[in-house]
Amino acid sequence: MGTLYIDRKDLHIRLDGNAIAFYSNGQREGIVPINPLKRVVIVGSLSIETQVLRKLADENISVVFLSGKRLRFSGMLHGRLHNNGILRVKQYEKSLSEFSAEFSKELVIRKITAQLQLLEYAAQTRHDLRLALTGGIKTLQGVLNTMKNPDMPVETIRGMEGGASAAYFAAFTKLFAASLDFKGRNRRPPEDPVNAMLSLCYTLVHFEMVREIETIGLDPTIGFYHQFDYGRESLACDLVENYRPAVDRFVYELFRDREFTARDFATDDERPGCYLKKQRRKDFYPLYEQWANEMRSLWREEVRNLARRIMDGQDTLSE
């Protein structure tokens, strides 16, 4: 077990030696050993003793707090972080140099290539949609050919990425059943089951990446492709871009294999938007974990490789 999800509002959580103990109405319902944990995700409102949080911090186990029916990010608790200050100094210098344009171009090419591969995979497995997907595939191929041009400014790169994303989602929506009402990417709030699942997965991956960034000693708010925006983890946004197509494929397969259907989602009469029903979240968490466990070594190495590049090849990243 690497991740513990706590998604019950009637719990009181205490420390029991090297384990977390769960109580409801004064009765202990179970314990989870701390040793195997790397991260804890706490959803909603519950009672947790400070000893538990202190123990998790001492063991360098990250805690992510999510709230509301749509699982909005509320905060994160870390244990020990890397103390390599020179890495952040170098990061700030690189953000103001030509490195930003170089990094941005590489990032967008990787993302569009992954989007293209997903559409090509879908065209091979969904023969009924091959013709419908062809337009998106050709557009992405054309964008990649254009991006071979040298000396492309970041503003142009962003424009190319935006055009590619529009073509990609126009094709991607065709992979889903009409009952899901998925007509394009929307968020804040998501308006249909597919967008609700995409937003949930993007949120979880984003803060997995924030954890890796902060643990190694980089500043998550200083990106290279995403410009600085107060309160936004722009570097995490940068690095997640490369893995959005992987999330898209994961979500596509969840609906393709009917792990989830439109009946598993609800809308709120008081607030607009669509969200996964609470009783089905318990089924989502293990599916996400199975997928994420295959991805986490890639995310960790992604961050480490970037840190090495920022340090101009000097490996000063010992933990």
Image (cartoon, rainbow, N blue to C red):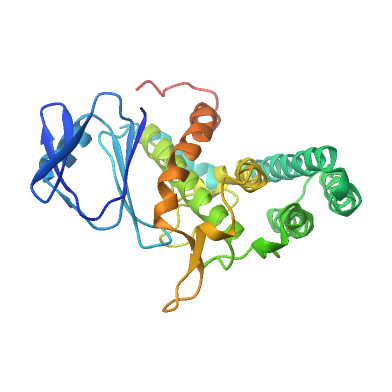
Tell me where residue 255 appears, x and y as whole percent: 63, 48
Tell me where residue 65 appears, x and y as whole percent: 31, 51
Q: What is the quadrant of the N terminus in the image?
A: top left
Q: Residue at x 32, y 32 (%)?
A: 82
Q: What is the quadrant of the C terminus in the image?
A: top left
Q: Is residue 304 visible?
A: no
Q: Dividing the picture into quarters, in which one does residue 178 lie? A: bottom right
Tell me where residue 81 appears, x and y as whole percent: 30, 34
Relative to residue 227, is residue 127 depicted above or below? above
Tell me where residue 120 appears, x and y as whole percent: 82, 40
- 158, 207: nearer the viewer: 207
- 75, 193: nearer the viewer: 193
Q: Residue at x 54, y 23 (%)?
A: 313
- 73, 291: nearer the viewer: 291
Q: Is residue 42 visible?
A: yes
Q: Give the left or right position of residue 7, taking residue 256 as reference.
A: left
Q: Dividing the picture into quarters, in which one does residue 278 lie? A: bottom left
Relative to residue 228, is residue 95 depicted above or below? above
Relative to residue 164, is residue 213 depicted above or below? above
Q: Residue at x 56, y 50 (%)?
A: 260
Q: Give the left or right position of residue 178, taking residue 143 as reference.
A: left
Q: Dividing the picture into quarters, in which one does residue 249 lie? A: top right
Q: Identify the residue at the far right of this view.
A: 131
Q: Residue at x 77, y 56 (%)?
A: 174
Q: Identify the residue at the far bottom of this view.
A: 270
